Image: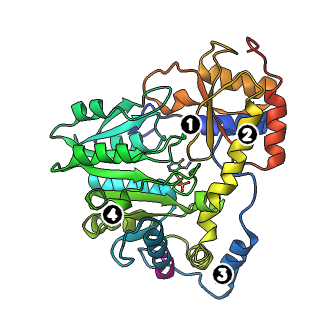
Amino acid sequence: MIPLVSKLPKTGTTIFTTMSALAAETGAINLSQGFPDFDCDPALTAMVNAAMQSGLNQYAPMAGHLGLREQIAAKTERMHGAVYNPDTEITITAGGTQAIFTAICAAIRPNDEVIIFEPAYDCYAPAIKLMGGVVKSLELEFPDYRIPWHLVKRLINGKTKMIILNSPHNPTATILTRQDIDELAALVKDKDILILSDEVYEHIIYDGARHESMARYAALRERSFIVASFGKLLHATGWKIGYCLAPAWLMQEFRKIHQYMVFSVNTPMQAGIAGYIKNEHVYTGLAPLFGQKRDYFRQGLASTPFEILPCYGSYFQSVTYKQISDKADVDFALQLTKEYGVATIPVSAFYTKPNHNNVIRFCFAKKQETLDRAIDRLLKVTPQSI
Ligand code: PMP
């Protein structure tokens, strides 16, 4: 055997893979991984098919299909009043994940420090470490999961290169407020700190709240990579298409990596999406669709012994289970799957340090009948039963 020193020695199978596999094996209802169990719009697949049949099957331009970049520019201007140049400031990627990896790869050098907030989506820290960067994680304050800005201030020093934000937030379903934006702007002012803003749930935001995109604020926009996902927008997570917005000086470096990482993303889907998102309802319709599911699911959970945490955005609902068990959340989630037939994600999986808040996350991006079946099963869970 040729010796190979692992670059990510502590990385094993993720909890998402484990829980989805267990759900399949046991026949449990899978509310673990974040994907819809309903199909995308047939009008969209028809547009993609039409693109294929019309011969759009060769490489797209490196930065992405121009028509799609133009539609993204129009959407961003409409939503946030921000003008991004499709030629120099928008790149189509293989999902939000590749955009995040590429941005980190372009910006982070050995010993650069990157601030992330835990619970954190799982792809940030490994990318930082692979670049030789240092992960500086701060915990969001339980149970409200707000950003402790006074601690961020203490953590910032000459080596701080980037802050990674995620709003609406996976897994806690919190959103950035105007006050957060002001705190952030004050902290980075006059400092060489970049922002990587993971906004893949940007259109899934409830109760009339506004998505506080970095794109809205010139002082933040000029130092930000903003990441979006068509998987989330179009109920097509398996297509793995997303995009990155950044000012030209940052996008230039982003594209240097992107062109060798994937060169370009599949053409017919880009062409199909370009036509489809001309209709504004595609994205304005997401909040009412998932808002109804959120309310329905929360109503069902209200009769169970789970304690429901707030949900302001995303399609995740977290709960605590203190009345049911004092088990660690991984054990609790495994038992809930095996004995009650509902698969969830233990939120400790989103922390690097041990976490004992006893919180699990459900994904409610599911058909009504799936939610009904899951609630029926969860109603059987009684205090002290696990
Ligand atoms: N960021 C967050 C917070 C996510 O939840 C996800 C998907 N689960 C991604 C990024 C990755 O998006 P994509 O599937 O488009 O790669």
Give me the residue at 25% from left, 58% from top.
Answer: 219
Q: Is residue 115 visible?
A: yes
In which quadrant will I find the N terminus?
Answer: top left
Mark positioned earlier in the residue sequence (2 or 3): 3
**Magenta segment includes 66:** yes
Few, some or many residues within 10 Å of mark 1 (<14, 14–19, 20+):
few
Q: Amino acid at mark 3?
A: Met
Q: Image check: 89 left or right of 59?
A: left
Residue picked out by circle 4:
254
Q: Amino acid at mark 4?
A: Phe
Q: Is residue 236 visible?
A: no
- The span shown in magenta is 65-69
In which quadrant will I find the C terminus?
Answer: top right
Mark positioned earlier in the residue sequence (1 or 3): 1
Few, some or many residues within 10 Å of mark 4 (<14, 14–19, 20+):
many
Few, some or many residues within 10 Å of mark 3 (<14, 14–19, 20+):
some
Mark positioned earlier in the residue sequence (1 or 4): 1
Instruction: Name the image quarter holding residue 364.
Output: top right
Give me the residue at 60% from left, 73% from top.
Answer: 269
Q: CA distance from mark 2 to mark 3?
A: 39 Å
Residue picked out by circle 1:
14
